[in-house]
Structures are given as C-alpha cells and as structure tokens.
Amino acid sequence: MFGALNRFISRLDSDAPSQTSRDSYGAFGFQVLRNKNNDIPTEPWYDFVVGINGRQIEEPDTNSFAVEIRNCAGSNVALTIWSAKGQRARTLQVAVPTPSPTLGLTLQWTPLSSTEDVWHVLDVIPDSPADIAGLLPYGDYIVGTPEGNMRGEAGLGELVEDYLSRTLRLWVYNHEYAVTRLVTITPSRSWGGSGALGCVLGFGALHRLPAPLNEPPAGPGETLFETARFSNEENRPPSAKLRSYPSGSSLYKTSSNQQSSDFLVPATLTTPPPPPPTGATTTGPPRAARKARKAVSPNSAFDEYFKEGEQKSKEEDSTPAAKSAPPPPPKMGGPPPAISPEPQAEAQADKAAS
C-alpha cells in the first residue's frame, strides 16, 4: 500500500511541480563537494548551485560559469541554491573579491535526483545490529556509504546482502540534531530477530530529507508546561481596560481588590438563596458560622487541578525508563562523497569555482 502511495505522490510531483521542487530548476545542478569559504553558508552534498544572477543553469558549461564569477569581481554574485533538505531553493548574495575572483567552492555537475536515494529509519529493534550500531528511530536517514553507490529502493538491500557478517559503513544524517555521521554496522541474520539490520526503513516520496528544524528538540525529563497561564498574560499592556457594558448586561465581574482591570474573573455560578418570607427580617448567619467561614477563591478548584497535573507530569518525567534514552549522535564525520564524476567535468568545475 505504501509503495503505491509513494508512486502516486511521485507522479503528482512530476505532473505539477511546485515552486520549490527540483523539477522547477531542471534535472541537474552543480553539487557542492567542498566549501573553503566560511562566508558562504552552503552544505556539501546537500546543496546544489542551480542558478546564477537570476538565470537558471541548464548545461554543465564551466567556462561560462567562471566568466560570470569574474565579471562580478568587486561586487556580489547571486547564487540560487537548491537544498536536498526539504527540497527548497534560496538565493545567496556572495561577495567576489577583486584580486582573486573565486568562490572557494568545489563543484560537480550532478543530477538532483541523486539525493532522493535515502532510507528513513522508522524503528529500531532492541539488541539488533542497527541498535548496536547506534541508529536512532525516526530521526536518522541513511544517505550514502563509502563502500559504493546505492541506487533505487533495492540499493541498500543489495549492499547489505553483500556485507553479511562483515563491517559496513553508512553515512547517516540525523534530522533532529542536524548531524551527519559515519555509522559502522555488521549485518547478520543470526542476531535473533528478523532482517539483517533489525530496523524498519522507509523509502520514497514520503521519506525524503525534511527541512532543518529551527530549534533543538526538548531533552528527556524536561517539563513542557511549568504552570498554566494565558498565552498573552505577560505581553498584555498594563493600560488595557475591560470593555464597559450597560448596567445589568455585564457578562463578567471584576475583582474588587485588583489595582487594574487587566484580568477577567468568572461570574459566580452559585444559586442565590431564596428571598425571605414577607415580614421576616434577615439577621445573617450565627457568629460561630461567620467565624468558621473562610474566603474561597473562585479559581481554587482550577489551581488545585493544575498543581496536581503538574506534579504528575514531573513524577512521570523523572521516572527512569526501562532503557535509557540514546544520547544525541556525535558530531563527527562529514557528508557522504558524491557520485564519481567524469574526470574532465570535475577538473573544469574545480577550476571554475575554487
């Protein structure tokens, strides 16, 4: 079922390409292999140069690309960068120095579809080869290997079969921590479970590399809500006033001991006592009952409810799990190497951009 759904979404992508899809920028681009310029925010392997100064690059003409760079010496050149993370494009304004009009990038003419051969790690079985190697469910994506090329949905399976009971190195990108690391795994069919890796993998349009996260994920044991409050409680200006209604039509009451009318207090929902009979005098409750009566806040029930929920949340977060949460992947290694290009094309690209 999932395979048919992936094929259907692929046909939709090819029939009606969106503004950020790779089909909008052609089938090829200059893939960034190395970046020696810290002023250019590009990621090797993931980023492609698909346009320059507002024009789309349609052919691997490295001479024209180098001439365009030299013509912008002393000013800025606009580079259109397509990223495999989220399949989005952005424009960078890069300053070209006058003495040496180069960018410090090593580029290679590569099809954009090469970044679609990724396998999403959906689940990892305990004590499996994938678990021992440190693969993390949901956040990890297998994007390549130093051992060779993996093409198509069956590419990883064929490589695993060739490396049964042998050490296999895989480039793994973690979406939650934005880290690409080199993982060493030993495929085996005698580890006690199904499969040679012991993990569930996803492939296709539903499992492409997502866009980077803007903020890091919450760590284990962190409380999501420390206390309950209105979302605009702290940002509410002190000069804000309640809207006034005619006498007898007010929907809310204001607290008498508040200095300002910034907050709303729910109206009393208790039923008023019946009126005294005609001729009777109202004397009020006995003195002992008046002494025993205590002021009860109208929100006391809600306060107790939120405190109880907060305490339960803290107890559940502090309870040790059966197996400790895996640490974040180490920031080591680098991006996977690109497809082996033609020697002439790579040399021309190096001459043009580095």
Image (cartoon, helix red, strand yellow):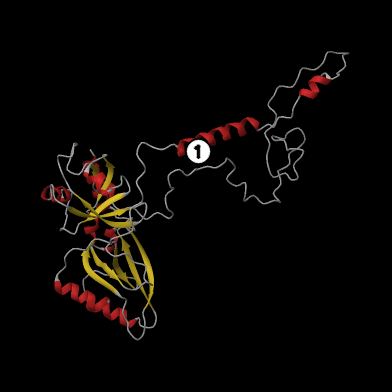
Residue 131 screen position, x and y as percent: 26, 44
Question: Label 1 sits on what residue type?
Answer: Lys
Q: How many badges with numbers are in the image?
A: 1
Residue 68, placed above or below residue 246: below
Q: Single out the residue that lies furthest toward the left.
A: 162
Q: Which residue is tagged 1?
A: 314
Q: Position of residue 144 (x, y in %)?
A: 22, 56
User: SS for tag 1?
Assistant: helix
Q: Residues within 10 Å of mark 1 (few under 14, many from 20)?
A: some
The single residue placed furthest to the bottom in the displayed view is: 99
Answer above or below: position of 192 versus 36.
above
Left or right, residue 124 beside residue 302:
left
Q: Residue at x 20, y 57 (%)?
A: 145
Using the image as rendered, state which of residue 251 and residue 338 is in the foreground: 338
Q: Position of residue 227 (x, y in %)?
A: 57, 41
Instruction: Give 136 or 78, whichever is nearer the viewer.
Output: 136
Q: Position of residue 316 (x, y in %)?
A: 46, 35
Is 165 on the left or on the right of 12, as rendered?
left
* Quadrant for the C terminus in the image: bottom left
Q: Is residue 115 above or below residue 344?
A: above
Quarter of the figure that contains the N terminus: top left
Residue 113 sits in quarter: bottom left
Above or below residue 192? Residue 91 is below
- Residue 18 horizontal side relative to residue 269, left or right: left
